[in-house]
Amino acid sequence: MSNGVLGKMPISPVLQNSITPIHRSSAMTLFIRPIMNSSVEEIFAFKTCCGMRVFDQNLEIQITNQNDHPVYVQSYFDLLDPSGAHRVETLMPHGTQRIASGETIAFYCTMDESRWAKAEKIVFHDTEGEEYPLRLV
C-alpha cells in the first residue's frame, strides 16, 4: 500500500481517493493519517491493566515528520466542518510533542462519530506557527 503525499499535502492512504490537494508555500511536510474507530482502546486497556484506565479513545492520528529536522507539534488540532472550526484539545499525549525527522508519533482522543463524518479538514499546528492541514473530503 502506498502512503500518499499529494504535493506538499499529506494525505491518508485510506482517504486518498476522496481528497482534494491543498498546495502550501511552506516546505514543511508532515504526513497525517487519521484512523477513526481504531483498536486503541483495547491497546490502552492492556498497557494500563494495573493503573490508570483510558476509555473511549476512538480516534487515532498518526503523524510522520517528513522534514530533515525535528518538528514540535502542539497536542491539539482544529476540525473544520460546515458549522465552523472546532478546536480539539483532548489529545493524548498532552503537551508539545517533538517529532524527529522520519519519526511517527500517534495522538489519541474521543471523537463524536457524527461530527467526524461531517468534518472537511483537520489542521495541526507546530510551535513555529506553521499549519499542517489535511482535507478529509
Image (cartoon, helix red, strand yellow):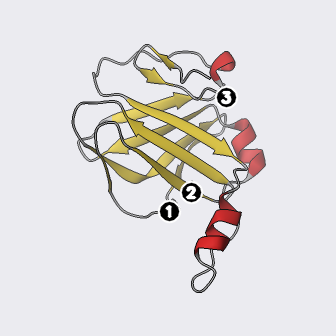
> Marks 1 and 2: CB-CB under 8 Å?
yes
* CA–CA distance in space, label 3 to label 2: 18 Å
Q: Earlier in the sequence, mark 1 or mark 2?
A: 1
The residue depicted at 53 percent of the width and 20 percent of the height is 4
The residue tagged 2 is 108
The residue depicted at 72 percent of the width and 37 percent of the height is 118
Q: Earlier in the sequence, mark 3 or mark 1?
A: 3
Q: Secondary structure at mark 1?
A: loop
Locate residue 41, reporting x and y percent.
68, 64
* CA–CA distance in space, label 3 to label 1: 22 Å
Count of numbered circles in the view:
3
Q: Secondary structure at mark 3?
A: loop
Q: In the rendered structure, which amino acid carries the disc numbered 1?
A: Met
The residue depicted at 68 percent of the width and 19 percent of the height is 18
Q: Is residue 91 above or below residue 34?
A: below
Decide if residue 71 is on the left or right side of residue 94. Answer: left
Locate residue 12, reporting x and y percent.
58, 29
Q: Which mark is residue 92?
A: 1
Neighbor class of circle 1 (other Cα within 10 Å; few <14, some 14-19, many 20+) is some
Front in this rendered view, residue 136 or 13: 13
Decide if residue 72 is on the left or right side of residue 119. Answer: left
Decide if residue 71 is on the left or right side of residue 8. Answer: left
Q: Nearer the viewer, mark 3 or mark 1?
A: 3
Q: In the rendered structure, which amino acid carries the disc numbered 2?
A: Tyr
Front in this rendered view, residue 28 or 65: 65
Q: Earlier in the sequence, mark 3 or mark 2?
A: 3
Q: Is residue 121 above or below residue 99?
A: above
Specify the quadrant of the image occupied by residue 129: top left
The residue tagged 3 is 14
> Marks 3 and 1: CB-CB under 8 Å?
no
Q: In the rendered structure, which amino acid carries the disc numbered 3?
A: Val
